[in-house]
Image (cartoon, rainbow, N blue to C red):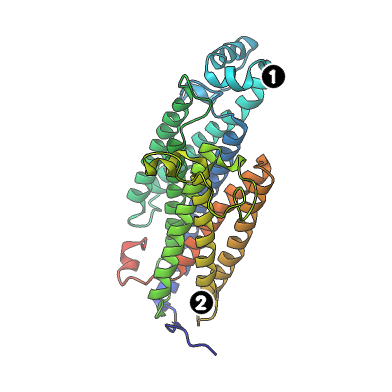
Amino acid sequence: MTTLPFELTALPPDKAGEAARQADPNRRLLASWLFLLAFMILVMVALGGATRLTGSGLSIMRWSPLSGALPPLSHAAWERLYALYRAIPQYRLVNQGFGLSGFQHIFWLEWVHRLWGRLIGVAVIVPLAWFWWQGRLVPGLALRLLLLFILGGLQGVLGWLMVATGFRPDSTAVAAPFLVAHLCLALALYAAILWTGLSVLNPTPAPIEGARPLFRLTLLVTGLIALTIAAGGLVAGTHAGFIYNTFPLMDGRLIPASYAALHPFLANLIRNVAAVQFDHRLLATVTALTTLATVVLALRSHLPVGPRRAFAALGLVVLLQYALGIATLLFVVPVALAVTHQVTATLLLTAAIVALHSLRAPKHDAARSGVSA
């Protein structure tokens, strides 16, 4: 048997912490609420991907946080919105002549996307107020959730700023950097809520001797996954997935000939579609290989059942995600497959966070602080 570079040994669980968790069913209720919020953000990411792929994101030209929750209720209201849409470049250059029915088709998807964002806000603030009023919030949780709620509001503002970039005279889509920022903030909120839910459910983890090196390696994997998702957002924003639809070569070359066509060189990383797609391919491959190596290392160590299952799931999801990425490219970005690829990317991030959380070191003051890191 090959000797691992470090040994992991599961120590006896913290009996006091376990008893505290069993004596506090309120933690399960809080965690369930947080996991529901994370799921709602996951649905939001899927809806955002669908609106981008169908060009629906520019169909609503006004940001009305309250009145915009209602759709047009009369034919005259529909005509007014359609007249506004006909004034933007996307209509003239992409959808000219598709009629009121065509406008309604893209409008409904964007309206549902925005409505879902409003529902997430309600799903945060109303239960939060109720938990606080009932004195059910564990120590340290209220402030953290309030900050996340504020960040969620800023996400809505960023979303509107992103949409506004699509109204420029020469534009038919939103600016790629804004799209990436909007996606990254959504995933940051998702990760923070998921981590908080896991910490509420398990505030005092059982110590695992020698787990620190594996924790650091898993942290690296999580960072690589997040970076690869951001690069994928740039691919989406520049429509780079609609060219070089072969794998592993791009136009018969491993590195496309036009990789450094723009000057200065750094402009290629954002605006050159050949470079943007290649960078995403490279990051995805490095991430997949690093993740699989970490999974193999974890499964060959003496981890408890919970972390072993988390790493096994991480290995399966990274293989699925890599295959979906290749398929999305080869089939020239069909909407259903591309949305599945985006959702699975979020699930991959989820698996990495769960695996990372399962290895975190216990804190002596976790029981007193309520929510561990």
**Residue 28 visible, this angle:** yes
Q: Residues within 10 Å of mark 2 (few under 14, many from 20)?
A: some
On the image, the x and y values in percent for residue 330 come to: 67, 48
Please tell me in which quadrant of the rendered image residue 185 appears.
top left
Which is more foreground, mark 2 or mark 1?
2
The amino acid type found where label 2 is placed reads Leu
On the image, the x and y values in percent for residue 183 come to: 47, 43
Question: In this view of the protein, which residue sits in the foreground, 290 or 304?
Answer: 290
Using residue 214 as the reference point, say whether residue 250 is left or right of it.
Answer: right
Mark with earlier residue (2, 1): 1
Q: Which mark is residue 101?
A: 1
At a point 39% along the width and 69% down the height, the residue shown is 216
Please tell me in which quadrant of the rendered image residue 83 appears.
top right
**Residue 125 visible, this angle:** no
Q: Secondary structure at mark 1?
A: helix
On the image, the x and y values in percent for residue 318 come to: 58, 61
At a point 41% along the width and 53% down the height, the residue shown is 136
The amino acid type found where label 1 is placed reads Ser
Question: In this view of the protein, which residue sits in the foreground, 174 or 204?
Answer: 174
On the image, the x and y values in percent for residue 342 come to: 58, 47
Q: Secondary structure at mark 2?
A: helix
Question: In this view of the protein, which residue sits in the foreground, 347 or 86?
Answer: 86
Q: Which residue is mark 2?
A: 297
The C terminus lies in quadrant: bottom left
